[in-house]
Image (cartoon, rainbow, N blue to C red):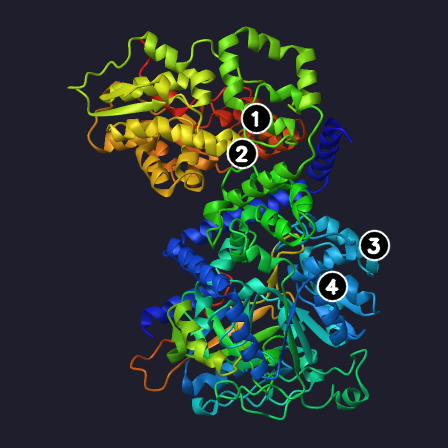
Amino acid sequence: MTADTLSRFVDAVERHHASVHRVDADEATTRIADLVDTPVVGVPLPNAWGIDLPDTVGTDPTPADLDAAATGVTAASLAVADYGTVVLESDAAGSEAVSLFPERHVAVVRTEDVVPGMREAIGRLGGRLRDGASAVLATGPSATADMGELVIGAHGPREVDVVLVESAGDGESVADDGDSAMGGATDE
Amino acid sequence: MSKSDSRAETAARIRHLLDTEGDAVAENTRGFNRGRRESTGALADYESLKSEARAIKEDAIERLPELIDDLRESVEARGGHLYVADDAADANEYVREVVDGGNVVKSKSMTTEELDLNEALEADGARVTETDLGEWVIQLAEEDPSHIIGPAIHKSREGIAELFNERFDPEEPLETAEELTAFAREKLLAEIREADVGVTGANFLTADSGSLALVTSEGNARKTAVVPDTHVAVSGVEKVLPTVEDLAPFVELIGRSGTGQDITSYVSLFTPPTPSPPVEFGEARSASAERAESAKPDSAMADLGPVAGDGATEPHPDREFHLVLVDNGRLAMREDDDLRETLYCIRCGACSNSCGNFQSVGGHAFGGETYSGGIATGWEAGVEGLDTAAEFNDLCTGCSRCVPACPVEIDIPWINTVVRDRINRSGDPGDLDFLVDGLTPDEEPAGLDPTKRLFGNFETVARLGSATAPLSNWGASLGPVRAAMDRWLGIAPERDLPTFERETLVDWFAARGGPRVTESMARREAVVYPDVYTNHVAVDRGKAAVRALEALGVRVRVPESAAVASGRAPLSQGMIETARGKAERCRDALLPEIDAGRDVVVVEPSDLAAFEREYERLLPADDAERVADGCYEVLEYVFGLLENGADPEGLTAGDGEPVAYHAHCQQRTLDLEAHTVAVLERLGYEVTTSETECCGMAGSFGYKSQYYELSMDVGEPLVEQFGDADRVLASGTSCGEQLDALLGSPAEHPIEAIAPADR
């Protein structure tokens, strides 16, 4: 992943009506806490990342919690720079439902997992799917054009925030431009 | 019913759809089509991605039985079930047993439309709810989808609001698209919570992993698959790809080709049964005692199992998965050399959106039992049979604008031509054949529709027309004659008929003394191909071509021997054997010229398209290639001469004159619009090009009584764009006539604009 890849990723996410928030690993928890609307449900981030979810996030939701939640927080295992896509893997902890039911989805992805193009992403997924994994390539919020014009927010989330975590050990530190990078600026 | 009554009925049905659905369909499809052009234009390797996608599908269909075996192994290894259903009844029976009268939520699936699965399940008392918003709208309205990917594009926002308000009587009447969407989301979430089984389709299946790809934007397919513990996916057998990696080009192409989105919100890659815990709200209808016991709206969904990224992919123990692969005629299509390409279709809708006729009437006219648009002819012929395909096959005019739009490079016009030929051959001998039989020495069966036979034999008509002009023209324009032509031959009385010139282009050229550029002075030698129209009707543009090329130093000939029809006319009527005979004759006329080092310059784009695109279907490969290589569109040829240093001094310059230019549909497909524009601009014309895919005339189509109004409607955007233009140029003869009818003033061929004045 290069600086160019990351900046293409940020542009593409914003083009698809979502927002990117770039943070260092040690500020990720605080930033997620700032972004969520309550009540909030989530799935713990992978252990290896060393990032805790804020205490406000309920990580063992019931269906009733899911139904009531305003925000869902999950990890994304991969991201695609050309498209602004995040890859959400299904798991027994309920990532698929948590990323789908609430109005707002906060996806946390590491800079080292951003690949340049769709071909690289599908290439990485090949082995995972053959091992039985399921994943959704999610790009921006849900949408429909079936009601006579484009509406953002259909059955899935209406708002999507991508928290892009600077990988530990990455040479360059990235300026925090999260709040200024609200989506929608390039809406057609 | 007589043929003229049947034509009147067709015209009435089309008029009704133009009035009731045309506006919504036009707005949506033209929007999708613009989006496709922009979105694919931004993709640097678009052409190579299409070729890659094509190659993957060719290989997959070739190896289909083996891939189905691999897929079965992958699905069963995870504890899922795979069933290959021979036909609709077989597929429905299997799904009925799984559903067992329970509540079903569905994401959009054309294959289940093909099966009439909902009706089969409802017969058992199942409650079936479509969760795609467009599909739900037509379920409520009890209508059929009007488009492969946008089932309700024929409905306006106002129409949907009226439907919801009448059906549900909400406290505050719904009005905006946002309100309608939010309302539908809540209504449908309630259905999803109560569902026992989720039914989805599949856009692709990967044999190596047992995964299915679902390309969606609303999120309903994800809910349908994740909430109930039982997932049934229904898919045609043709959707299987060898590996996950093969998905790459399709993921990049499908959204762009369909709605013009570079990617849809969600591309789900499920490898079911998935690890996701079902979301048990405890509201499912036919939950067994055991399941009711375990339903837990207020207890945690998951024992906190391993999370994504930490590697666990075990199927959730409560999940059940059934994959139903539907044959229903597809394996026979695989054995059919002409219909096989249909199986490469990824159902993106690009052929519908890029089609002038579809943009005007939508899938309720341009469609069969299930499928709509250009490719539907292949699907309906293979799945339902020729009779169903025959109901709408006429609406493909062969304009070929779908060809570059198709992400898997299917020759959709050829499928339509082949099916038309089969329909022609399946008809009963009519009682009016004597009217045209004597005139028309063709290779077709006795039952052929007389209108098709007439247009298919235009060469003969034109020869007689010139020979007897002006008498032929006076006769044809008389009121009683036009009424008879409408009644017996189906020729629209509103149309001006071609006026045959007494002096053909060939005769004119001979009379003026042959070539005027000497051999020693010639930059190149060329033959201006005297196609039927240029030779007999639009003779002036042929003369202009001769003068323009001579001004550029080309030694031009217009030999009598080359005045041979290309076969385009019979081809457009589905008369393939007649067209083959013409193609052979035309090849025999042109190859000696090409072999002698002369370039063949073609004025009429539809004839050039026959040489470039269809001759490979009609002639031995080597002959077809030699003809195609030796022929040039006239402005393409001028462009090449200018690029190679010819002096444009002798041509008529534009001096900043604005011109509005509509390229011919088939010329665009050959990528030859740009050459005309470049020549005009180089000569100082200020060019505005049309954004309309096809003018609507499409050769003979607009002359047919039952399609006249549709044809005029297709051309309507040209009126909006070119209505105020002072000078309109068009490359095709029939485009010129259509523009004349639409704008009230004749259009010229670009070669007439740039040719030196007649001396």
Distance from Cα at disc 3 to Cα at disc 4: 35 Å
Chain identity of mark 1: B
Question: As rendered, which of B161 and B33 lies closer to the eye?
Answer: B33
Q: Nearer the viewer, mark 3 or mark 2?
A: 2
Label 3 environment density (alpha carbons within 10 Å; few <14, some 14–19, many ≥20): few
Work out whether mark 2 precedes mark 4 in sequence or the reverse, and give the earlier one.
4
Same chain check for tags 2 and 4: yes
Mark 1 secondary-structure assignment: helix
Please name the residue shown 66% across and 26% down the image.
Answer: B705
Where does label 2 land, which residue? Answer: B572
Q: Given the image, on which type of amino acid does mark 2 rest? A: Ser
Q: CA distance from mark 3 to mark 1?
A: 49 Å
In front: B573, or A168? Answer: B573
Circle 4 SS class: helix
Q: Residue at x 57, y 90 (%)?
A: A55
Marks 3 and 1, the one that precedes in the sequence: 3
Q: Is residue B609 left or right of residue B71?
A: left
Spatial CA distance of label 2 from label 4 is 37 Å
Q: Are marks 3 and 4 in contact (CB under 8 Å)?
A: no
Residue B736: where, in percent of width, then height?
Answer: 49, 24
Q: Is residue B570 above or below residue B494?
A: below
Chain ID, mark 3: B
> Which residue is labeled 4 in the image?
B89
Q: Secondary structure at mark 2?
A: helix
Q: Which residue is mark 3?
A: B166
Q: Residue tagged by mark 1?
A: B455
